[in-house]
Image (cartoon, rainbow, N blue to C red):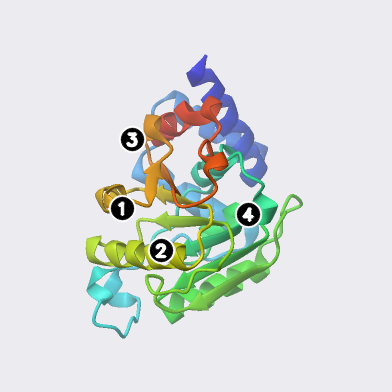
Amino acid sequence: MTRLRWLWKRITTSYRYRGIRFTILWCVMYAIGQAHTKRFILYRAQHFDRRYGLNTAEIIYPSALDIAAPDAAQCIEYEPCIPEVLADALSNLSIPMEEYVFVDLGSGKGVGLLSASLFPFKRMVGIEWSKRVATIARENLLKFTHPRQACRNIAVLDGDATAYELPHEPLVIFLFNPFKEPLVRRFVENLGRSLEQCPRHVVIVYYNPMCREVLEEARFLREIEIAGNNGPIIMYESTVAAPERSAAVDTAGIESLQEASVG
């Protein structure tokens, strides 16, 4: 039943973002065990671009990101996240999203922002080190239209995401494996200082968590998605404020994140 629940949720999410034809194709590819292949993942990204008239699908390596900073080598190549995976994770959050600011650190060409814009966040901010990529993200935001888009107050800023002065409001912070360990540590230190200045509830949605041990070492964070340890997304929340929100994830949807790694 858990697997069927996850499958139905993924089908409905795919329909919301991509329509019926692609969703049927995904079901077929999933049934024959091909939905997770590199070839189909590339096709899925290209389909997203064609459907909405965007430019998100290509992979850009750090040497081509035009980042004029000594830490450029600590960045990970740009590639788009899968909108449905992020949407499934956000749908498990039992928080009043209209009170939260969504912050995408290392926002790339804006796929995470576009995916999350179907949720009613107070506002959304993306921080991108590469001016070239940030410009493309802003163009994508202007082009994207969706009848269910719930948040249109979205900005993409140029700058160092690890040093960004985080808004003093409840936050959902999204990371799609944007940095190597030294920069992840810098982000965590920056977050710690921000929470000392302004204690508040913060949720971190870490997609492809290659440096998860850095967040687990932080005493002001706790993991809230234990069942997804082997999945593509792990969630954390701040421990310095809002203890009433300690169950920020809907436990009925926990196992769906673990299953999402196959799709």
Closer to viewer: mark 3 or mark 1: 1
- Check the picture and name the quadrant holding the C terminus: top left
Which numbered disc flags the more N-terminal residue, 2 or 3? 2
Q: Is residue 23 visible?
A: yes
Image mark for residue 247: none
Q: Is residue 34 visible?
A: no
Q: Which residue type carries mark 4?
A: Arg
Which numbered disc flags the more N-terminal residue, 2 or 1? 2
- Using the image, determine if residue 241 lies above or below residue 21: below
- State the image coordinates of residue 210 (x, y, percent, origin top left): 27, 50
Q: Is residue 141 left or right of residue 108?
A: right
Return the residue at label 3: 229
Q: Which residue type carries mark 3?
A: Asn
Crowding at dot 3, Cα within 10 Å, few <14 / some 14-19 / many 20+, comes out as: some
Check whether the beta carbons of the residues at disc 2 and disc 1 lie within 8 A of each other.
yes
Return the residue at label 1: 218
Crowding at dot 4, Cα within 10 Å, few <14 / some 14-19 / many 20+, comes out as: few
User: Residue at 48% across / 57% down in the picture?
Assistant: 173
Mark 3–mark 1 Cα distance, whole angstroms, equals 17 Å
Circle 4 SS class: helix
- Using the image, determine if residue 195 lies above or below residue 231: below
* Residue sitting nearer the eye, 237 or 60: 237
Closer to viewer: mark 2 or mark 3: 2
Crowding at dot 1, Cα within 10 Å, few <14 / some 14-19 / many 20+, comes out as: some
Mark 4–mark 2 Cα distance, whole angstroms, equals 36 Å
Closer to viewer: mark 4 or mark 3: 3
Q: Is residue 42 left or right of residue 151?
A: left
Return the residue at label 2: 191
User: Residue at 48% across / 71% down in the picture?
Assistant: 127
Return the residue at label 4: 51
